[in-house]
Image (spheres, grey):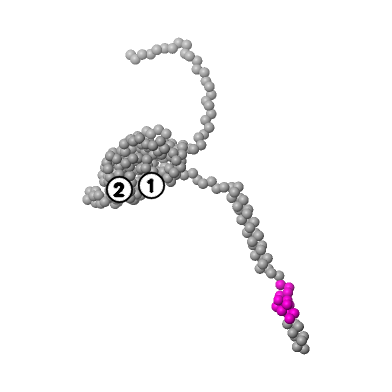
Amino acid sequence: MAKGSIGKQVARAAATGGGRTSRGEIPFGFYSALAVIVILGIFIVGYSRYEMQHPVAKPTVHPVIGDNWHFAFGVYDCTTFLPNLPKIAAPKNASFTTTGNGIINLSPKVAADEGTGATLGKFASYYKGLKFTSASVTIPPKGTITSGASCNGKPTQLETAVWSSVLSTAPKLYTGDPSKVVISSNDALVTVGLVPKGVSLPKPPSSSQLANVANTTTTTATPATIKPAATTTTKPVSSPTTSSAG
């Protein structure tokens, strides 16, 4: 074969991109990637549309504005409870108030005091003179009690016990700063106190008063529609009688 013919064949092969075998190949990889992109795009658009048409409602965490809760509260020092917090003039927007009987009324007035914002720290912010830290409690008119003080010869630590109701027997225990403790149930019992490690805090004495507090049930933000009662006519008694104690 002449050298000229071989040169022409090589030139033709180079012009076709590598020879006869590459001329008839189908780019399956390219089309597959394109199909995946199209399918993925359709899925994303469809899912976004579904989410817009079916928004997920966030669960309501009580208490909320409109709720009227109460909880018993007491401060325990070693072996005895301190006197109940006295009644003080509270701001109009106060979410926490007390009449001095050891029962605290919790009715959120602002969104910041709803749900997980209903803390003992918020209570202290509305009650002048009451203060919590990680190692002490300042309560009027007693003053400040501090962890580490001796109780029957043993050092004390600051704890907070929260019972979900009067009938509850197993409280949730918190150590450290009580201001972070959340009031998460109506008719709860809360004791903040100094006790040696391993000693249980008792329920506050005012827990017995919860049953006597009116309107302790949870109210909702949207009250039910009340239908007017049917009108009735009462006829006067024709011959009234008078009775007297003998």
Task: Residue type at mark 1: give it.
Answer: Val
Q: Is residue 180 magenta?
A: no
x and y percentages locating residue 192 in the rendered image: 32, 45
Q: Nearer the viewer, mark 1 or mark 2?
A: 2
Task: Residue type at mark 2: give it.
Answer: Ser
- In the image, 114 versus 246, the foreground residue is 114
Left or right of 191: which side holds 186?
Answer: right
Q: Residue at x 38, y 34 (%)?
A: 213
Q: From the viewer's perspective, is residue 35 above or below residue 22? A: above
Q: From the viewer's perspective, is residue 135 above or below residue 65? A: below
Q: Residue at x 28, y 50 (%)?
A: 147
Q: Residue at x 34, y 15 (%)?
A: 245
Residue at mark 2? 136
Give the number of marks: 2
Tell me where the magenta segment starts and ends, as one range. Answer: 11-25
Whether residue 5 is visible, yes or no, is: yes
Residue at mark 1? 181
